Amino acid sequence: MLSKSRNSCEHCLEKKMKCGRERPTCGNCTDLGINCKYRMVLYWGGRPNKKVDKKTKIHEGLSVVNGVFVIKRCEKSSQRRRRKYNEQSSEVTLPKQTKFSPEVELNSSMEFVRSSEHYSSLWLHFTENTSQILVATIEANKGEHPFRVTIPNLAKRSLTLTKLLIAFGARHRYQLYQQPKDYETSQLMLGEAGKELVKIIESLPDMDQETGELTLACILMLAGYCIFFGDNKMRWTIHLGAARYILSSILGHTTPSNGQKSVVVTYCADPSPRFFLIRWFAFMTVLGLLSSSPLANTEPLVFDFSGLNQRCRTAKCKLDFESFEYNAGLRTTTLEMLMKTGKLIMAHESQSCYAKQTNMLFGEAIELDYEIMRYFDSSESENRILASAKGDELLLATDLLFGLSGMLHLRRRIMNLPSSSKMVKDLVLRAARVLLDKVPSSGTALCSITSCIFVFGCECGPGSGLEPLQPLFSSRLEQIELLGMPATSPARSVMHECWEKGSCWWEIYKERNIELSFGT
């Protein structure tokens, strides 16, 4: 029961009646059936008139904010150093905008994200969840994670890139939870970003380098979207060609002695956004070449690995992991050898390849196969010792799988060895052991080696003697699909067709005009 009020209610005071002061309704008001109200009188207690002129002394370090005492926060020395570093690293110089520049003021993109709670949640989903499955490992380089740090920071300067990240996060969340609103948002953001990119590319001759780099980031993210989600309406090869066009404008052309123009791309380990974009483009190009897409090699492209490899091919560098591209999950040397493999395959499959050229390519394939095999055999035991101390066994495993897949491409597609050949079977068995023992069956690292799992799995057809390995490779592709990467679904269908008909996956690609790649 509520305690009685100190004063009479307003009705009893007005009528000069004796009030019972019951709450919430006194007896008189209850009998009359009217609303009972009490005047609210605030009692602060104490002696309010004592020492009226006395001023409260506020301790140094305290301040009053909205009537509340707030103490000044004291930073530890480590926090001051970290804050100073973050302020320095976050300083960016925004160049003057061109007519259709994707650059915007720093707050504009974030205001767009914050304009909708739905957009904010999708942005957060991309940076915290989607980004984890776009790299081979997050444990080794949390502070340098490009899809959680570098790309979102670039997006803060480009509304177009911001929309693409929201689209990517929305589509990924849709694959996981099947919320229709996420899919609709993904398509909306893609449509808007696509229209903006068309205008930007039209103004390419007027672009400065900063604008070109932001545009390159947009196009690579769009290509990554198509690869990751297997979007057939927007083929990744078209976007890769556009990225090559942008790169040629940023880097300029050099003309070799034969008079044919080529784009020289210097592969560098510099952590700045520009060189990350070049490394990302190189990875997409390599896996595009290995997937036998003609559009992945439409014009001469020269990657210069000499500066990095001269330093990283030493025994010391093999052991200190300087040569690793942590995001892709392979060494720079491995990437270079895979690029050579892809170019040999493209040359071998071109219609202008005559018998003499075929013999030359065959010899080059044998030499490259030997180079890859020797490279991994000489470093594997040393790396295993170091990995046990550093916890980098996963990176060594993914790097080895990429190397073995390169050898498989050479032996099957240029040397024409059958799946039942001992040289092919040994590669597949070795890859299966690495996959079982070193790569977690439900880890996100599987997404980075999807291409390896696919090509090894396709060799387990009838008569190969590798049929018992079919469940292993099939289950790994299923797990990748469960992680939200639907592009593995058509890949798994092709793999099963290889098992049923004994066909080669690259022949099925040609018959069906399929352009699958896994170079996100």
Image (cartoon, helix red, strand yellow):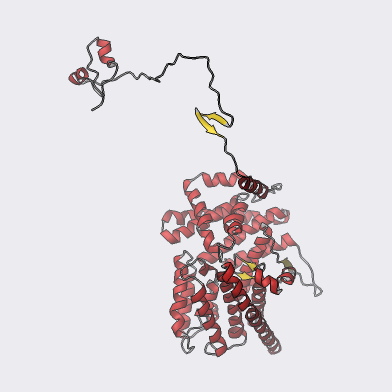
Using the image as rendered, state which of residue 450 and residue 216 is in the foreground: 450
Q: Residue at x 59, y 53 (%)?
A: 152
Given the current orientation, which residue lies at the most extreme right position?
Answer: 257
In the image, residue 334 above or below residue 82: below
Q: Is residue 486 visible?
A: yes
Q: Position of residue 275 (x, y in %)?
A: 68, 61
Residue sitting farthest toward the left = 31
Name the foreground residue: 84 vs 25: 84
- In the shown orientation, is residue 150 left or right of residue 3? right
Residue 223: % across, % down: 58, 63
Q: Quadrant of residue 26?
A: top left
Figure check: 117 above or below 463: above
Q: Eyeballing the image, is 253 above or below 68?
A: below
Q: Quadrant of the C terminus?
A: bottom right
Whole-percent x, y for residue 333 in the image: 67, 73
| Residue at point 63%, 58% (across, down) | 217
